[in-house]
Amino acid sequence: MTAMEQAVDRLAAAALTGKPCRPVRDLITDVADAYEVQRRLNANRTAPVAGRKIGLTSPAVQRQLGVDQPDFGVLFADMEVKGTAPVQQLLQPKVEAEIAFVLAADLTGDLDLGTVRAAVEYAVPALEIVDSRIANWDITITDTVADNASSGLYALGADRLPLSAFEPVETTMRMYADGRIVSEGNGAACLGDPLNALLWLARTARDVGDPLRAGQVILSGALGPMVPVSPGLTVRAEISGLGTVAVTFDDEAS
């Protein structure tokens, strides 16, 4: 087996068995190879593609991992949860509050902030439940990219607003765990503006030949620090000007 095939097998085995694996950075050394591992793993998913997620939008996290740009993963339809999240399907879950953009148009051709703003049908508050197949979250940029940008599950709120009704960069976020504030942040924490993150992803997806499409859900990246979760915990996020979203981590959920 090639080193890339070994990386694919290592991550696939972790997902199948529920037992985190050691990092894959000993097998792949650059981001391009990591995205190829991601692509091969995702090719085995049977659920339809629902959209994309943007990661590493925090400058502090970028510095920690020694990178100067975000990364992305693929969202599948079976990753969305409503009300409860099945903890037993996850290995090492953490949760973060984000803005989700739902697109009304494909994002191809020349792209700028005006183009991506016009392509957004509406935004909703979101919780991303990140997860890592790699033991103890011992990750570098190549590890997380290969692992579908540490994707797990996501939940969307009921509030839907067009961008004419609020400015993502001006939002503030508070996230509560069982009623206790555990994370705070704002729109500027996400690449200076969540729309900057959307523009970066739109250009990157276009350039790799897999552009963002109408109807897809795009998770912006975290508005504040992520926090670990445990069975029975209820997490609720309030995003000013947009609304709320909540999920309970239920180890009996299916």
Image (tube, helix red, strand yellow):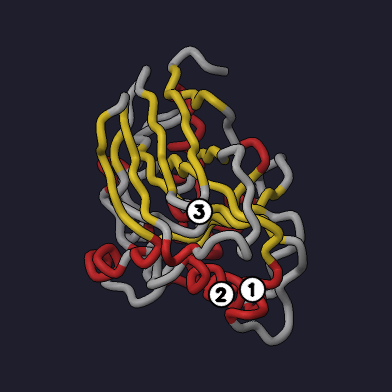
Distance between the alpha carbons at the discs numbered 3 and 2: 14 Å
Q: Residue at x 49, y 26 (%)?
A: 85
Above or below, comparing residue 173 to residue 246 in the picture = below
Residue at numbered disc 2: 199
Q: Quadrant of residue 122?
A: bottom right
Residue 71 seen anywhere in this rendered image of the structure: no
Distance between the alpha carbons at the discs numbered 1 and 2: 6 Å
Badge 3 amino acid: Ile
Which mark is first along the chain, 2 or 3? 3
Q: Residue at x 45, y 45 (%)?
A: 11
Distance between the alpha carbons at the discs numbered 3 and 1: 15 Å
Category of crowding for the residue at label 3, using alpha-carbon neighbours closer than 10 angstroms: few (below 14), some (14–19), many (at least 20)? many
Which mark is first along the chain, 1 or 3? 3
Residue 248 seen anywhere in this rendered image of the structure: yes
Instruction: Depth check: give the residue in front, 64 or 175.
Output: 175
Nearest-to-viewer mark from 3 and 2? 3
Above or below, comparing residue 132 to residue 232 in the picture = below
Residue at numbered disc 3: 99
